[in-house]
Image (cartoon, rainbow, N blue to C red):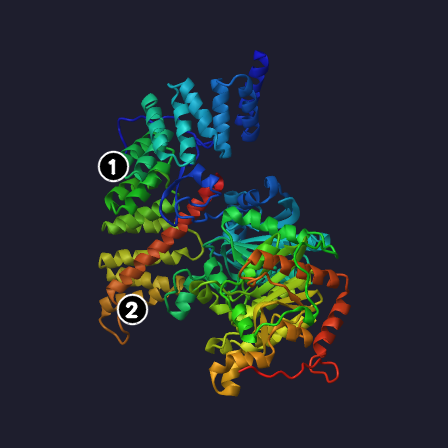
Amino acid sequence: MVRQDLAPVPHQRGTATDAVQWLKCPSCDAFVYIKRLERNLKVCPECRYHFRLSAADRIAQLMDDGYFDERGQDVETVDVLGFVDSKAYTARLEQARLKTGRRDAASYGHGTIGGFPVIVAAMDFGFMGGSMGGAVGEVITRGAEEALETRTPLIIITASGGARMQEGCVSLMQLAKTSQILGRLKDAGVLCVCLLTDPTFGGVTASYAMLGDVLIAEPGTLVGFAGPSIIEQTIRQKLPEGFQTAEFLLEHGMLDLVSPRENLRQTLTKLLRMHAAERPRHLRRGDGASVITDPAALSIRPAWEVVQLARDLGRPTTLEYAGHICDDFLELQGDRLYAENSSIVGGIGTIAGRTVMLIGHQKGHNTAELVARNFGMPEPEGYRKAIRLMQYAARFGFPIVTLVDTPGAYPGLGAEERGQAVAIAQSIMEMARLPVPIVTVVTGEGGSGGALALGVGDRVLMMENAYYSVISPEGCSVILWSNAAEAAKAAEALRVRAPELLELRIMDGVVQEPPGGAQADPVAAAANLKEALVTCLNELLPLTPDDLLEARYQRFRLFGTPGKQPVLGAREVAS
Amino acid sequence: MDTQIDDVNRRAGEAFAAADFQASYLLALDGLRNRPEDPALLGLAGRAALELGLDDAASYLGRLVDKNPEDPVAWRDLAMALLGVDDAAGAETALRTALRLDPAEPGARISLGHVVYLGGSVDEADRLLWEAATLAPDDIEPLRSLVEMHRMRGRTQAALEAASELARRAPEDVLARLDLAELHLMTGNGPESLAAYRRLRELDTEPGHAGYLVHAMIEVEMQRERWRRALDLAITATSLDRNRLTTDLLAYVSTRLFGEGDRETPALADLSARLKERRATHRRLHAEALVTREARSV
């Protein structure tokens, strides 16, 4: 209690030594010394809770030297309805301005991140809960229009409770106004990255926040359409722990990545660098072995041995190949529809200085990894993610590299309910229509439609010890021999090996593997793979989109065409 | 030479006063090259580094207290720098020295209160923060921390004392009034709690918050078994909040007044748990907003 024996002394708050010194973390309840919090980019050092930032703080943290050339300062907030609740809207605006020193909840301007020019539009939750009225929509739209006009990447930082009630349907129309300009950016192939910050809800989520090419959120950020209390009251159920957090959204396929605050600048810089990279039509070759295109140059092993080699748990996975062959790589996740499926991975990377979209099936080396990746058997969401990433690549003119290694698409109840066949079919068709070079390499197992869904390339290669088949040898054996034990015979009969598929023109070339297979020396295998990709890209990059599409059409048109389809000689199936 | 150094000192000091900490820091470092033990330059370098969040703040301020061991402000600033790099033990020593040299310094006392609290000495923290609150009557930070500390430890009466003082000093502060209302409710002081909630209905103008307040007022009236008044408030609540809790409260209070009806009466324990959760949500909204505002302002 107040001590009677102590006399008050002058005590002013000004610089760090005088200002508010301690804050209680809303997440872990720890008292945190404010300078320590600041040094940690306002992330609680005890529990990693990311404190909400003002737009100004966010810009200071992200932009080079905190520099931001603000535009659109003439945008006025208009009380279009003459709205009054317990207070007049104009009075609420005035109060918010006094509290935040801002004109409204969003601002935009020019600057650089990692040396790359950007236009940034940032929202501030502190101004009337970041609600979106006409002025906010105008700021976002102007930022996007300038991005379109100057072909400068646009970064939108969202923080909002939703549309601003006080502007009625005019605020509702901001969803359409902002969405249509983002549609134009997409059509024009101008990068838009949305950084979703805590909290982002309602009309902002139902428009521009979710329409970026890349969606990033900080850990723990709450993002949703309806607020949790509304949902709880409607469905009369308690919502699960972590509902509507960034991690929840990532798991449900709505985000590309969740990035801690300290990595955001680095992530954005990497993304911008890859988008701004030169687009050489000729890539420098490395020191890997050349692609083999003559079937006679390949030795032939027993088919079942090849199948076993292709399934070896030690073989490099797509992400490992990405690490070896890409100078830069940023994994992007989610199908934006239902779930993140990690049996297929993808992201932007650079190979020999050229930005590409790399997509592939992902397995693992042990039981835990295999279970986590569902043994490389994708559900529909995996294919839908692949389609999304391929369309992304097409928008920006990035060649596509696909790495195939799957026993097949997952034969599950849920997969069927959610349209496994539809997803595969759409992926196959979409690949046939993309106006950018596509190189596919079967790196392990090429299991039927689940493999082909990533395999409609201008050039289709396979690793020396990979196999590609319409059905698994075991499945074929069960159906035709009525016994799974005849899988080895089935493998021979199906002609699943590289030399045979090269002869059938299913493959355009074979990537050599080191002695003992790719699993024996992943680095050498990756060097050979990179060499093959560079060779193929050098052939394809000079072609026009029309030529690419026509050649791809003819490539797949050939199969089964009488007189054109090569035929293999009869082989006796070894017992 | 001396004239040049004095000029650097002056410019570094002016830059610091103008909050251009980067310039102040660079000028001070420049000056220290020629006069490495100059206390004024060490102080400017350390304090500017502290403002800029640089690692070497503690180094310069450490050298400053070596030169001027009787300077309480230097000790206090050294403590701030040490806290910035998570050296709580070093900071505690520095803060105790600062207070020994200047017992009336509120800033050091506030920080020492927090540091000893983190070390588990709640009673000493309580004493230090009350002393700080007495020495700096315009500063509500120590009182707010006292409320938080005692609430977290379940020391309701101690929290109420701090909250009462806080609400007296900051009559427009919503969180302070909210704490006061809730702590009175928790200690069974119905009339005081209701008075604080009534005041909050004027202060808390956030859209949708009136529902929280009326629910809390119903809870107070239920605690006091004033069922007629609780019913009036429950009826008011129906126009403010469509939360299912509102209809359940209405049903419960009606039953208490008029006896069982057709509708199943919700259990009191369940209602109490939901009301408590609702109070916690309301408080969290204000506490988070306050923390965000304070975090923004630095």
x, y percentage for residue B110?
35, 33
Residue pictured at 41% horizontal, 32% vertical: B82
- Answer with the quarter of the image where residue A290 lies: bottom right
B125 relative to A483, above or below:
above
Residue B123: give its label: 1
Q: Position of residue A550 (x, y in %)?
A: 75, 72
| Image height of A97 relative to B43, above or below | below
Q: Secondary structure at mark 2?
A: helix
Q: Residue at x 32, y 63 (%)?
A: B234
Q: CA distance from mark 1 to mark 2?
A: 45 Å
* The image quarter in which residue A423 lies: bottom right
The answer to whether B236 appears left or right of B225 in the picture is right
Q: Amino acid at mark 1?
A: Asp
Contact (CB < 8 A) between labels 1 and 2? Answer: no
Tag 2: amino acid: Ala
Disc 2: which residue: B251
Q: Earlier in the sequence, mark 1 or mark 2?
A: 1
The quarter of the image holding the N terminus of chain B is top right
Q: Is residue A455 visible?
A: yes
Estimate the x, y position of residue A85 in percent, counting from the top left. 48, 56
- Left or right? Give the position of A261 relative to A68: left
Count the marks: 2
Task: Give left or right: position of B98 versus A342.
Answer: left
